Image (cartoon, helix red, strand yellow):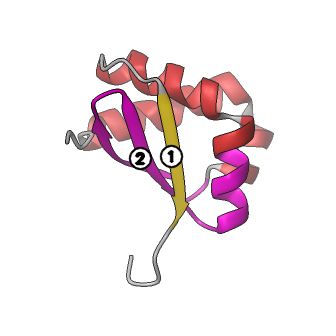
Amino acid sequence: MTRPTDAQQLAIQAKLNLVLGAADYDRMFLGFRVEDIEDEAVFARARSEYQANQIETRYGRQLAAVVQSVTGHPIARVTVRAKRWAD
């Protein structure tokens, strides 16, 4: 598993904001974080189950493209889960 560096995390957030627009980014991606990249899959956390589901289903392709462009890892699958209470 590969964990994005802090600089990569910031770059992912900035590119998502640019690609999606500030309104969609602020509504869906605040508190979002890419946790790990394994093989061709990205694993991420969102603030709620609703946001995790929406990010996966509505923004999965854009997220995969952005993560791939920032990290250089090919991404074919996106999995987003809600943050755990301990996070």
In x, y percent, where is residue 17?
Answer: 63, 33
> Residue, x 31% and y 38% (percent of image)?
37
Q: Type of residue at label 2?
A: Phe
Q: Residues within 10 Å of mark 1 (few under 14, many from 20)?
A: some
| Residue matched to label 2 | 43
Highlighted magenta segment, given as a residue range:
30-55
- Furthest-right residue in view? 23
Above/below status of 85 relative to 67: below
Above/below status of 13 relative to 35: above
Alpha carbons under labels 1 and 2: distance apart: 5 Å
**Element under label 2?**
strand
> Residue, x 43% and y 27% (percent of image)?
67
> Residue, x 47% and y 24% (percent of image)?
76
Task: Tell me whether circle 1 and circle 2 mark residues in contact (CB < 8 Å).
Answer: yes
Q: Which quadrant does the N terminus fall into?
A: top left
Residue 7 located left or right of residue 80: left
Q: Type of residue at label 1?
A: Thr
Q: Residues within 10 Å of mark 2 (few under 14, many from 20)?
A: some
In x, y percent, where is residue 49?
Answer: 66, 66
- Furthest-left residue in view? 1
Residue 68 located left or right of residue 83: left
Above/below status of 21 relative to 87: above
| Residue matched to label 1 | 79
